[in-house]
């Protein structure tokens, strides 16, 4: 079954791309994803300051800068994985380095 792992963190303490590439914990997580069959996709997102929020109300398109929610933790990236079941997806999410200081939301994909 396919799952999306929504990777949430506090952008004020988020590591750089270079730090992530050199981090043994991130390397171990990547190896575990490959062991389970590989990533089906994913991406790290740019900071929320670059976000644009779109709403349509009564036929009018409303566009605003930044995220919709006022919160400390933001979705900083996603991983799409294929796991045998929810327990395997949870175990994989628990191995993600960001689970140590942020959180990983596991969502099944409609197929």
Image: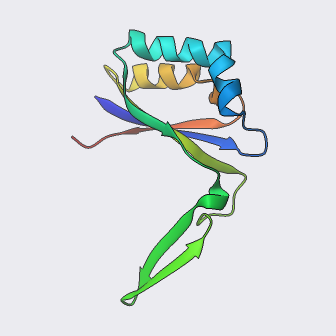
Measuring 49% from the left and 19% from the top, which residue is drawn there?
Answer: 91
Quadrant location of residue 99? top right
Image quarter hosting the C terminus: top left
Measuring 59% from the left and 44% from the top, which residue is drawn there?
Answer: 76
Q: Is residue 40 above or below residue 63?
A: above
Measuring 78% from the left and 39% from the top, which residue is drawn there?
Answer: 13
Residue nearest the observer in this picture, 77 or 107: 77
List x then y, in percent, for residue 103.
62, 36
Is residue 24 among the parts visible in the rendering? Answer: yes
Q: Is residue 54 above or below residue 67?
A: below
Is residue 5 among the parts visible in the rendering? Answer: no
Q: How is the image coloured?
A: rainbow
List x then y, in percent, for residue 1.
28, 28
- Left or right of 42? Residue 9 is right
- Left or right of 7? Residue 12 is right
Q: Is residue 37 above or below residue 58?
A: above
Identity of the residue furthest to the front in this view: 18
Measuring 72% from the left and 45% from the top, which residue is drawn there?
Answer: 11
Identity of the residue furthest to the left in this view: 111
- Left or right of 99? Residue 86 is left
List x then y, in percent, for residue 45.
55, 45
List x then y, in percent, for residue 10.
72, 44
Q: How many marks?
A: 0
């Amino acid at each position: 079954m396919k799952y999306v792992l929504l990777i949430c963190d506090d952008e004020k303490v988020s590591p750089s791309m270079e730090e992530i590439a050199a981090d043994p914990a991130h390397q171990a997580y990547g190896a575990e994803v490959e062991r389970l069959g590989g990533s089906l996709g994913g991406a790290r997102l740019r900071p929320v300051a670059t976000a644009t929020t779109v709403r349509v109300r009564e036929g009018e398109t409303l566009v605003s800068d930044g995220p919709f929610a006022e919160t400390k933790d933001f979705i900083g990236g996603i991983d799409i994985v294929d796991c045998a079941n929810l327990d395997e997806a949870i175990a994989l999410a628990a191995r993600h380095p960001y689970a140590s200081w942020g959180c990983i939301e596991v969502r099944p994909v409609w197929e």
